[in-house]
Every structure is written in structure tokens, then in C-alpha cells.
Amino acid sequence: MTDRVWPGYRDAALRVVAALVGTLPVAVLGSVCLAKLLPFDEATRVALGFTLAIPLWVALMSFAFLTRSGWRAWAWCLVATLLLGLITHGIPQ
């Protein structure tokens, strides 16, 4: 009986950790991308980018909780982090 219950707890724990820890780099890199790509002056871009980091993090946490499994949440977080990292460091300022 406990063998059937444990995967549910493991999946829930993976989702919680992915939502709290895995989405933070995605939110930070997303705000950096916004700060680099918005068509305003530099001070406005930085202010908007980093002001939107926390609401973006909350939205991403909610999205991570809605995934079908914890592994998919982690996979999504890793892929999004890699893509945003490439965009952030690949676009010259």
C-alpha cells in the first residue's frame, strides 16, 4: 500500500520544489530580457524589468503547480532557463 502512495508524494514534492526554486531563475532571466529588449531608455527598462520580476515569478509558480508531473515542471524550468539565458547573453546591448 505504501508503494502506491509514495510516488504521489514524490511528485508533489518535485512540483513544490520546482515551483519555488526552479522558477526563480526563469523569472530573473525573463526580467533581464525585458530590461534589454524594451524600447525605452535604460533607466525605464531596468525599472520595468525588475519591477515585473516578482509578479512574473508568482505567475510561473502557479504554472509549475499546474503541470501534470513534477518531472515536467522541472523540464519546463530547465528549458526556459536555458532559452532565456541564451537570449540574455546572446543579444548584444
Image (cartoon, rainbow, N blue to C red):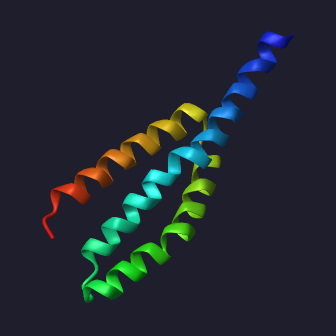
Residue 66 visible in this rendered orientation of the protein: no
Residue 2 versus residue 53 in the image, above or below: above
Residue at the extreme front of the image, as rendered:
43
Q: Nearer the viewer, residue 82 or 65?
A: 82
Residue 66 versus residue 37 in the image, above or below: above
Residue 51 in percent (x, y) is at 49, 77
Residue at the extreme left of the image, as rendered:
92
- Lateral position of residue 53 relative to residue 31, left or right: right
Residue 12 in percent (x, y) is at 70, 34
Q: Image quadrant for the N terminus?
A: top right
- Lateral position of residue 91 relative to residue 8, left or right: left
Q: Residue at x 71, y 21 (%)?
A: 7
Please tell me in which quadrant of the rendered image residue 35 appears: bottom left
Residue 30 in percent (x, y) is at 39, 63
Q: Residue at x 41, y 40 (%)?
A: 78
Q: Image quadrant for the C terminus?
A: bottom left
